[in-house]
Amino acid sequence: MASIDELRAERLRKLAELRSAKVDPYPAKVTLDYSLEEVRRYATKLKKRRAPLSLVGRVLGLRGQGKLNFFDLHDGTGKLQALLKQGEVADELLTRFETTVDRGDFVAVSGSLFVTKSNELTLLVKDWQMLSKSLRPLPDKWHGLTDVEERFRHRYLDAFLNETVRTRFALRSKLLNAIRAYLDDAGYLEVETPMLQPLAGGATATPFKTHHAALDTPLYLRISPELYLKEMLIAGFPKVYELSRCFRNEGIDVTHNPEFTMLEFYEAYSDATKQRQFVEKLIKTLVKKFGSKMSLTYSGEKIDFKTDFRVVTYYDLFKRYALIADPTSATAKELSIKAAQFGLTVPPGATREKILDLIYKKVCRPKLTQPTFVVDYPKAYLPLAKAKSDNPDLADAFQLVIGGLELVKAFSELNDPVEQEARFEAEEKSKQAGETETQPLDREYVEAMEHGLPPAGGVGIGIDRLAMLFTDTVNIREVIFFPTLKPKS
């Protein structure tokens, strides 16, 4: 079996042959009448067409030689069989096709449509042109890329060879369009906020840090657009949203990628309860459009969206699934012992909230298959959230979990600048005490708040995880076309 280097050398020889014949193997202009999907749609009409039909695509499935040369043409919208037949095309063109064309090349062809005896719609080629000579062979049609890392590393091949992959990313795009349409119809304005920020605020996460040479100042890739979006509420825009790329300098696993897509939207004069209702309607609208009879299948489980989403409290989940009788009063030591029973490693000096979060993610959240709103989080978890009026120890917030995936985090926005500054200062003290993930003291944001931030409800939705749910995939890298990968050694 020939090596890649040998196969590439043979294709380079064919490239040289084309150039020696004064044929441009990479022309700029292309003649195209219809996509291949349109050809199939309008086949009855196009078979009667007298003028030559000009089509383009990638050559696959070369079959035959001499008098009859069949091949499959793919253009991304569909495929069509084509035939070069002796007597129907110039001998020079037939010979050039046989000696220079390989599987994977892009060509332009023109001719007439007919149907073979096996009822296959086919283009009888009268003329052809090389559009792009490929120098490396495509992976085997049947086996494709079997190594998962190679699939992600060569996504362009993975998607070309696997229709399921292409369909998955097409659905992701349609989800984004549907979300935009839903928010636009609800009166939201799509806006843009900085990706490079002087402080990495809006979430509790480790940022990527860079440096601006001309300003001689450090900058951070955004971990969230939240604070800037709330400044737009201050500016008088009552409803805003942003579909944005965010970056967090953290580990990679099946639900986390350092670069990801986040939807955040904020509504003035709203709160967590109103936004919870809005989120449920949004998700049900998406399921109605892209699901089956108001249901989805995820990891072998049928998820039903017909009824109202379940609402449970954060602490009740520990009672039910972790068998912690009173999670509100359990000490850090007691929780550490419980965490160890679940095989969890607790970092030295971890707060009780941190340990609870570890147990929640390992034990409780995976149990939440059907759509579930989790409410009544400890206020310490969310330094930007307003406390509940009837219990100041809890945040007026919710998360939406479906299929064990945390899809949505939302809360009533804290709009008291004095309390916000105190919360930021508490975060600073935690950082000095050794906590690695805290929110920075953003005095410019506090200053903006002092000009008046209206009461508001804010929502963040992880688009990649939402795409995982709708495409029934359990690895986030399956729904990110170019996921972050360790460089090859």
Image (tube, helix red, strand yellow):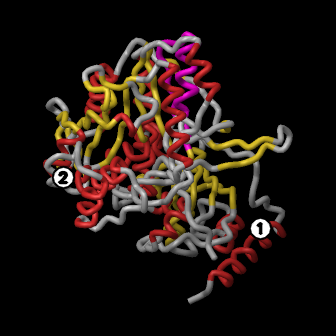
Location of mark 1 (residue): 18
Amino acid type, label 1 = Leu
Residue 124 in view here = no
The magenta stretch spans which residues?
225-246
Image position, residue 213 (x, y; %): 84, 44
In the figure, residue 300 lies in which quadrant?
bottom left
What secondary structure is marked by label 1? Answer: helix
Amino acid type assigned to the residue bearing label 2 in the image: Glu
The local secondary structure at tag 2 comes to strand
Q: Residue furthest bottom?
A: 1
Q: Which mark is residue 301?
A: 2
Near-viewer residue (416 or 483): 416
* Label 2: few (<14), some (14–19) or many (≥20) C-alpha neighbours in 10 Å: few
Is 436 located above or below residue 453 in the figure? below
Task: Write down the quadrant of residue 26 in the picture.
Answer: bottom right
Say if the magenta span includes residue 239: yes
Whole-percent x, y for residue 115 in the image: 40, 53
Drawn side of residue 31 relative to residue 363, left or right: right
- On screen, residue 287 above or below 91: above
Q: Nearer the viewer, residue 58 or 470?
A: 470
Regarding residue 179, the answer to whether it shows in the image is yes
Quadrant in the picture for the C terminus: bottom right
Q: Position of residue 313 (x, y in %)?
A: 21, 37
- The disc, 2 or 1, on the residue closer to the chain's N-terminal end is 1
- The residue at 70%/80% (across/down) is 10
Q: Furthest residue to the right?
A: 214
| Residue at 23% in and 51% down | 364
- Crowding at dot 1, Cα within 10 Å, few <14 / some 14-19 / many 20+, comes out as some
Q: CA distance from mark 2 to mark 1?
A: 55 Å
Above or below: residue 189 compared with residue 247: above
Number of numbered discs visible in the structure rendering = 2
